[in-house]
Image (cartoon, rainbow, N blue to C red):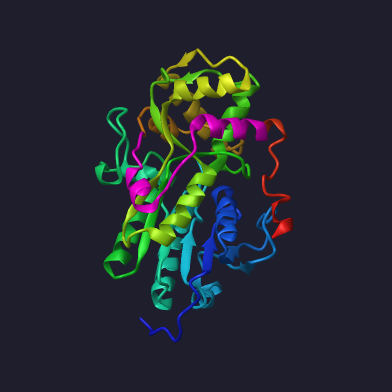
Amino acid sequence: MNSPTETAPTDRIFLTGGTGYLGKHLVREFRHAGYELFLLTRPHADRSGLPLDGVRYIEGDLLEPSSYAEVLEKVGAVVHSAGLVSAWESDRKRFDRINVQGLAGLLEACAQAHVPRVVYTSSFFTLGPGADGRPRTESQGVPAVGFNDYDRTKILAAEVVNEYRHDGLDVVSVLPTVLYGPGPRTQGNHVATLLEKLVAGRMPGLLGDGSQCWNYVHVADAARGHRLALERGDAGRNYLLGGENRTLREFLELAAELAGVEPPRRKIGFAMLSAVARWQVVRARMGGPPPELTPGMVRAYRHHWAFDDTRAREELGYRSRSLREGLEETLRWLQAGGDSPFRDEWSGM
């Protein structure tokens, strides 16, 4: 490694993924905390709702470290939230290029630039599913097998992170659970689509019997957890960023109550769901629309994904709002049109 020539200001952050669902909340969180941001973006990325003050937009490509390497010499930390979050891609290798090779290239560039700290957005899928609905911690993971290409490559990415940690790079990984809340309508914001279908009466029913227990976290709380991990996290530590554990039935019943609609009662068997998923994938491969459901998603929905984020609460001071409060806000936002929640926020900064 080359020796650093000077110490970069600690209040400067190089941020990837800042134009995405979680990413725009990260921009807001770090800017309100007083950080100056160097934001890696593609030339035609959607910058709507992002500030001009305190943000330097670096046009480049995650897969081309030469497009951003010089910037790493100017920052005190890197927050890497960029990734391919998708249920299905016609080119499966895109997942490997972005989620694994892109990460490896960035970490190598960080090592060469002697970046003091990297915060990496990992995934709860790397911990594997639970055998029951009891919440599990970061240290209670099971061998993860990946239900689709997203899961598979996030598992591989966690191995890359461990390799660089072993070589001395300070990487703190944060593992948000199921994100929900206002924000860009990307595939990472799939809960908004689910809530829209519920409110419109277009949700066909429960997946299975609805007893699968998942953990839900408001996207703004997850963004705050990233900042706390940067400021207070221990080197080489993994932190779950979660909220409440609820079964699918409980989640939909609460959302229906708040929206003033009837919750779904019909149970849809997994055999039928698998058949629909296979048909949607075949249709997509023949030039049809991308599948809303894939066989891997169906397999994941069979399992429990309940988690305990005590480590983040005790070590970082992390907190999350109640699911009721978060869903109330999300439903109000959807009823108001679901536009960018950041549109007028930056005028006073």
The quarter in which the C terminus is drawn is bottom right
Q: Looking at the image, which residue is at 34% across and 69% down?
A: 169
Looking at the rendering, which quadrant does residue 213 occupy?
A: top left
Most common secondary structure along the magenta stretch? helix
Toward the viewer: 302 or 24?
A: 24
Q: Looking at the image, which residue is at 35% across and 30% down?
A: 304
**290 within the magenta span:** no
Q: Is residue 44 visible?
A: yes
| Percent position of residue 211, x then y | 39, 21
Left or right, 162 with respect to 67, comes to: left
From what the image shows, is residue 299 above or below residue 138?
Answer: above
Q: Looking at the image, which residue is at 30% across and 46% down?
A: 138
Toward the viewer: 86 or 168?
A: 168
Q: Which residues are magenta?
A: 306-333
Q: Is residue 291 visible?
A: no
From what the image shows, is residue 9 above or below residue 81?
Answer: below
The quarter in which the N terminus is drawn is bottom left
